[in-house]
Amino acid sequence: MRNVFATGGATAGGAVKGAAAAAAAAALALTVIAPLPATASIGAPPRVSWRPCPDDDPVLKDKLRGLECGTLAVPLDHARPRGTKIRLALTRIRHTSRAFQGVVILNRGGPGAHGRDLPRFVTGMLPASVVAQYDWIGLDPRGVGASRPALVCDRDYQDPGRPRPAYVPRSGAEERAWRLRARRFADDCARRYGSILPHMGTADAARDIDYVRAALRQKKITYFAYSYGTYLGAVYASMFPHRVRRMVLDSVVRPSGVWYGTNLSQNVAFEKTIGLFFSWVARNHRTYRLGRTRKAVAEAYSKVRKELATRPINGRVGPSELDDAFLADGYNDRTWPSHAKALSDYVVRRSPKALGAVWHEPTWLDQNSYTVYNAVQCRDAAWPRTWTRWHADSWRLYTEGYRFETWSNTWYNAPCAYWSVRGGPKPVVRDAPELPPILLIAATRDAATPYPGALEVHRLFSRSRLITQTGGMNHGVSLAGDRCVDRAVAAYLATGALPPSRSGPDLSCRAPAPPKAGGGRREQGAASEDRWPEEEPATPAEGRTS
């Protein structure tokens, strides 16, 4: 599950990784993880001591200015509340209204995404009357960002200081070399954090959230999350249904696919959304001059990849780095104008400057996010432990035409084949009579968390409501300019008001038009020449080639 909401960006986050699922599943046959008492057997934890955040935070620099900061010691193993403690880093924006409605705990996703800057983002996008009624809580989950310890393993896996090998192996030797690199990453994590890795699952994070609730002296919480955070929220709601006041889950993970299956489904979904990008570029041929058809644009991209294999830009940006950068265009359309221009500059003007700038060397926070991503997903559920399965599934999808994401996703998740802690059993996601209605939000063309995931969770939580952005492909729908969606979210947070229950989506919102060529302002509705391009069947010639 690659996470787009890792280290900051357009909506609630933004590196280039996310979750995926492709088909609604039947009833879950999952092993129950029984919830521990919220505060175990030692009473309520100490209150959080708040203080003004520094103007120059060691991790997020000036992004926390004006917020309050605090820390909370939580058990590494919640089954042993008197044992080893780890420390969570939190932020807060306090309520200003007498009509106090409690706390909203925010989560950006990931797993591995930091969250202390989220209160500023979220409160800046909601009506002031709603903002005033809550305390808004940002949190770096265990292992992340300013929480301690913060996990970082083998930095060479993500950034060896030179272009990484091509994702698509051209020989058995190249595939074995990638496997060795993945094993080294997993082994380094085991060496550094062997006592911590058994306690890095989503169920552990859910218990952390409830520990935070207790430290804030709240009987219930409101929870607002994106992407992987929706799975964490669903697990929390299943473990602690009596502690949920309200819950907003945007871009919903399919619980039955966690996690190997969701990544296979993601490979299929991203082939479609990157095709939407290529089609949009083709429709704007007069601006970008990369081809008049989706196929022509895809071929232009493929040609650039081949050139970078022998002449990487600045000695750093080769085919793998280019693919990582342009994966963002499968997550959302906000990058389309700048990425299309960069590609056009390289192809038409033979200027590599803009194209070289679309890739950024991984920061410490990126490396931290990737490490925790593995620590959580490898722990959550069982993964194939023999490479035969990975090899067969990757080549099957690739030869079926799903080329753009398949092999990069394989290597992104490959450390789980060698992880020192066996994954599973998966946390159960289930309904409960005391659980209030949950508000779900999903775009029908989201590739990172495909729409069937929202349908599955909508069925699992019988009183939930589903807002569908019809025709949208952006990962992270709410608080991004769709007035139809944002009005419903604001009403729910203000009063608990919900869309009327209907068959299928309870509220359908038309996706905003795709961006204008050159980055002009988009319109709220897709109309005339600014309509969304129709999906076309993928062909093996498009996107990546070996």
Image: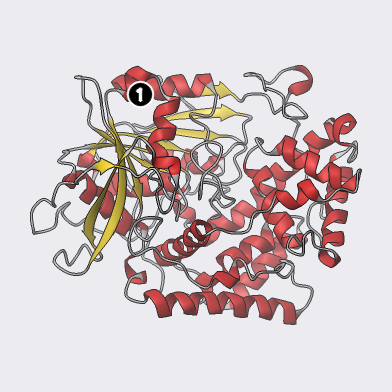
Q: Residue at x 48, y 58 (%)?
A: 369
Outermost front residue:
55
Residue 466 vertical position relative to residue 200 in the rendered view, above or below: above
- For the point 22% across and 43% down, which residue is it? 50
In front here: 294 or 163? 163
The structure residue drawn at horizontal position 87% and vertical position 60%, both measured from the top left corner, is: 307
Element at label 1 = helix
Q: Is residue 192 visible?
A: yes
Residue for badge 1: 492
Q: How is the image coloured?
A: secondary structure
Residue 425, given in percent of the width and then of the height, sits at 36, 65
Instruction: Specify the amino acid type for callout 1.
Output: Tyr
Give the quadrant of residue 431: top left
**Which of the two residues, 257 or 517, is positioned nearer the viewer here?**
517
Count of numbered circles in the view: 1
Locate residue 353 relative to residue 230 in the image: left or right.
right
Measuring 79% from the left and 21% from the top, which residue is drawn there? 529
